[in-house]
Amino acid sequence: MSQYNTHTLSNGLRIIHLAEESEVVYCGYAMRAGTRDEADKKEHGLAHFCEHMTFKGTQKRSSLQVINTLEKIGGELNAFTAKEETVYYAAVLRQFFNRAVDLLTDIVFHSEYPQGAVEREIEVVCDEIESYNDSPAELIYDEFENALFHNNSLGHSILGTPDCVRSFTTADCRRFTKRLYTPNNAVFYVIGNIDFNKLVKRLESLLSCSSAEKALLRKVSQYDASSSRERAGNEVMDLNTHQNHVMLGTTITDDIERWRMPLFLVNNILGGPGMNSRLNVSLREKRGLVYTVESIMTAYTDALVWSTYFGCDRADLKRCLRLTMSELHKLRKTQMSNAALLAAKRQIKGQMALASQNRESFAIDMAKQYLHYGKLKDNQETFKRIDAVTSEDIHTLMNSMLTEDKLFTLIFK
């Protein structure tokens, strides 16, 4: 396994560094502050809104200074919000690394959230929400998870609703970030050729005034799985779309470590990025019924979500659903041969190895693992877990967790 440097400051901030010989450094803060950490319905969308507002000025930098600090030297500064975390990230030439550390620390822990900027950003975010409403192929993912999780916070749309967003104030942003944007609720991560000891000292200095701030950490396994099991069946929403958009899937919340790798493989076999995925071959290559068909596995700290999506002409809806169910049935009916399983494992390991060459994505994945689990698994360790999956594991998964009576289907018409 690669050698990582790690350290925890007295205020609880965890630091992780992977040394690499490169002129570019990737770094940032991963915060345990996502959509599921919103306290109540009045906060729907607040995690994402605070991410936007964190770029709007600090105690010592204006919004223009924030966006120019790295951009003017060719660097990158950005952020995203997810269900379980918000990540602020930067990529810079190694000579400007200290500048990136100072800026990231300033915006994450010292943003002001001025009311004038809040009011302007409200309309920006509302436009973002409407752009999703105009894109059914994207909107269906939000609606599907919200229905699947039966209105639990894990299913809430990251963007929130226009009504909620229009109610946000400076006080709301400060309350949310005071509660969750604290050192003990964060990881600072780096990939690059930097002096780790100097980084530790710099972060100690920058965050010396934050030692008393402690976040109320989210309790893992707060999600009640029984609600999602009640969602098996079908739901049709009439949105007057040109195509029919379809998602079907389910959640796994029992013994998720047992099922993680088998589901990882099944997901790739059925609808992964390869053009030889079974659903792509069946629906697109052989019959030309769809442009896009894919399956998605999402791993949360206390739930696995599996789903598949396709868009098709109205006249082809029943046929596409039948073909999709047929591919699932094949995996339920007959165990995969050793040769087929070996080929599936070889493919997914190759895809992982290629994906790890995107160092920015790799750095963010590293940070998220360390943030939520306090440990890392590199590709070689994951490969061993993939190799350990048997045909019987996949057969059992298909016949216990992915049966038709546990699948929920959402259709946009």
Image (cartoon, rainbow, N blue to C red):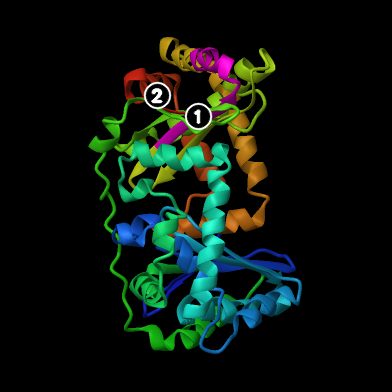
Residue underneath mark 1:
308
Q: Which residues are magenta?
A: 305-323
Few, some or many residues within 10 Å of mark 2 (<14, 14–19, 20+): some
Q: Position of residue 172 (x, y in %)?
A: 37, 72
Residue 89: image x %, image y %?
A: 58, 66
Closest to the observer, 407 or 126: 126
Q: Residue at x 40, y 58 (%)?
A: 163
Q: Please tell me whether mark 2 sits on a helix, a strand or a loop.
A: helix
Magenta-span inclusion, residue 222: no
Q: How many marks?
A: 2
Task: Where is residue 35? Give x, y as percent.
Answer: 40, 56
Q: Amino acid at mark 2?
A: Asp
Is residue 22 rendered to the left or right of residue 376?
right
Front label number (2 vs 1): 1
Identify the residue under disc 2. Answer: 393
Q: Earlier in the sequence, mark 2 or mark 1?
A: 1
